[in-house]
Image (spheres, rainbow, N blue to C red):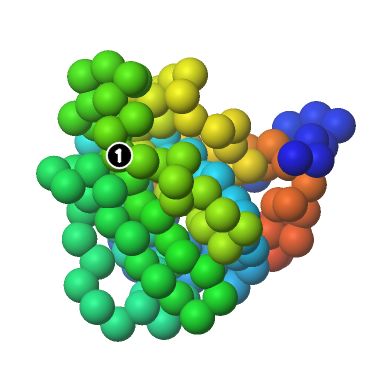
Amino acid sequence: MNVLPKIHSLETGPLDEAGLSQLAAVMATSLVAPLMVYLRGDLGAGKTTFTRAMLRKLGYKGIVKSPTYGLLERYTLSHFEVVHVDLYRIAQAGELEFLGLQDLHSSKSVFMIEWPERGDPHLAAPDLTIRFSHAGTERELLFAFHTSITENLQIVLANSIQ
């Protein structure tokens, strides 16, 4: 993993659901695998909505359901696989072993991990962290880029946000 000299970040203004989905679609255009994305934020902050919109832009035609109860959903696409994980219901980080996440890591995997703090210290370090915050009926996002694999994504998102 190539670490950037410092964490670079971008912050959005308030976004409605359409704006959130549009930003997810922009992000989808620059995704590369392997990639580990942490999705942080309260319940109902838009983490699954964002992932669903990203998958739609990537061409996934099937049902995109929340992984809250199944904990893990896999979406095979033409260039890589998106593994969407929701750790909200994990009682202990050691339970991750039963999900087999380590077996899913490959050069063609993009992980979208909701509630990653519940998996510490058993998760791989993130390349990107997205913090979702409530702003009334809208949402604000803070993107923190941790590794050089996200450099192009930084540029694309910066151009979209400004």
Residue at point 46%, 24% (across, down): 122
Tell me where residue 49 sits by quadrant: bottom left
Q: Is residue 142 left or right of residue 101?
A: right
Residue 143 can be seen, yes or no: no
Residue at the spot of label 1? 99
**Does residue 70 appear to the left or right of 131 in the view shown?**
left
The x, y position of residue 84, in whole percent, is: 36, 52
Query: For this rendering, which residue is in front, 14 or 142?
Result: 142
At label 1, counting other C-alpha atoms closer than 10 Å, the crowd grade (few under 14, some 14-19, many 20 or more) is few
On the image, which quarter does residue 61 sit in?
bottom left
Task: Name the residue nearer the viewer: 16 or 69.
Answer: 69
Image point 73% across, 52% down: which residue? 149
Residue farthest toward the right in the current orientation of the protein: 5
Q: Residue at the spot x=52%, y=58% of the render?
A: 109
Q: Secondary structure at mark 1?
A: helix
Q: Is residue 100 visible?
A: yes
Q: Quadrant of the N terminus?
A: top right
Q: Is residue 122 above or below residue 37?
A: above
Q: Position of residue 91 (x, y in %)?
A: 21, 19
73 lies left or right of 24: left
Quarter-wise, where is residue 127 in the image?
top right
Q: Is residue 19 above or below residue 130?
A: below
Total marks in image: 1
Kind of residue sitting beneath label 1: Leu
Closer-to-camera residue (33/28): 33
Q: Which residue appears farthest toward the left when viewing the image?
A: 69
| In this picture, residue 117 sits left or right of residue 107 | left
Residue 112 placed where, x, y %?
Answer: 43, 49
Q: Residue at x 46, y 65 (%)?
A: 81
The x, y position of residue 68, in whole percent, is 19, 43
